[in-house]
Image (spheres, grey):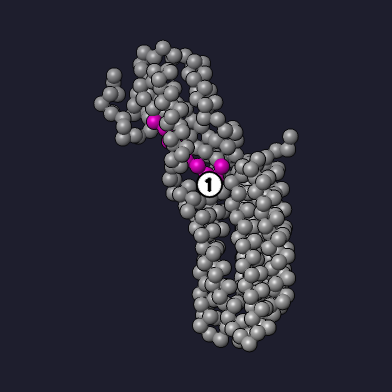
Amino acid sequence: MIDKQVIEQRLLWQSALLMFMVAISGTLMGVFTGSAAVLLDGIVSFMAVIIKIMMIMTSKLISRETSKRFQFGYWQFEPLVLIVEGGFTLLFVIYALMTGIMSLLGPGTIVKAGPIVIYALVFTIADAAYYFYVHAVNKRLKSNLVKFDNISWSIDAVLSAGILISFLFAWGLEQTEWAIYARYVDPVVLIALSIQMLPSAIKILVPSMKQIMGVAPMELHNRIQRIMDEFMERYHFKDYVSSVQAYGKTKIIEIDILIPKNYEHQRIVELDAIRNEIDEAIGGRAEEKWVTITFTATKRWMAKDYLLDEADDDE
């Protein structure tokens, strides 16, 4: 059976290589035709290549799990890379939007529509096909890095489709008495593509910022609470406090369990058995979670929680 990490890195390297080819093609076509919209597509693709290489490095780091300097692992690097990707995309989109507006208010841009139409048709089909291929593979792989990496292909497919439709229209205008207006198609397309890319940048930035800031994923929190409520009833715990966090596909789960001082299961082997049951109920791959479960008879050794009454410490 092929290791999940191997498949993930192979997909990321494959994606980087193909996107590099797209970037070169888009940049050369943008320079050749004089189209700022096509040049935007090429430059965004170059940015995507850089981000993809960073994702590959992150994937390799995460696979190492821990080191002397990073004793809790490298999970935090994953949202950091995604923040860089979303941040660069957002800044470049704003720049492209301003460039398009200035060009639209000026004399417009004269471009060679024919070659652009052929270029856009080829890459619309190629980008969309590769996006759906990776999407299908990642349904089984469930890699957060591959998921966000694949967004770049959906962005590029939509960019190419927008360019195709717009410059087909521009080519049609050139054949009529309204040919003078064809020069305004390029800045309009640049503005439209910039606006279309904004949600994708935000879609990457928001969840990554939440992870870096330590915002607890409520779906995971609620699931752990339901599991622990069942175990409280089964094993008669006095109380518990759970804390959860997520870094990409890795889940950090800490559970402090308060037991009576005269608890019936006091032997280490018995508590380990309960700990194993809780871990199995949580589920998930061992390499994608960090679970810490502690037992104590004193509340001050539990994580702080507003539901706890410290007056009960000595009960």
Question: Can you see residue 299?
Answer: yes
Residue 132, above or below 39: above
Label 1 SS: loop
Residues shaded magenta: 241-249
Question: Can you see residue 96?
Answer: no
Whether residue 168 is in magenta: the answer is: no
**Quadrant location, the N terminus:** top right
Residue 277, above or below 71: above
Identify the residue at horizontal 70%, vertical 38% (top origin): 3
Quadrant for residue 287, please give it. Answer: top right
| Residue 98 drawn at (x, y percent) | 51, 75
Between residue 315 and residue 92, name the one nearer to us: 92
| Residue 191 drawn at (x, y percent) | 54, 72
**Quadrant location, the C terminus:** top left
Residue 4, above or below 108: above
Identify the residue at horizontal 57%, vertical 73% (top origin): 190
| Residue 168 drawn at (x, y percent) | 66, 74
Between residue 212 and residue 298, name the one nearer to us: 212
Whether residue 246 is in magenta: the answer is: yes
In the displayed structure image, the side of residue 207 where residue 161 appears, left or right: right
Question: Given the image, on which type of amino acid does mark 1 rest?
Answer: Gln
Identify the residue at horizontal 64%, vertical 81% (top origin): 173
**Magenta stretch: dominant secondary structure:** strand
Residue beneath disc 1: 76
Quadrant for residue 54, please give it. Answer: bottom right
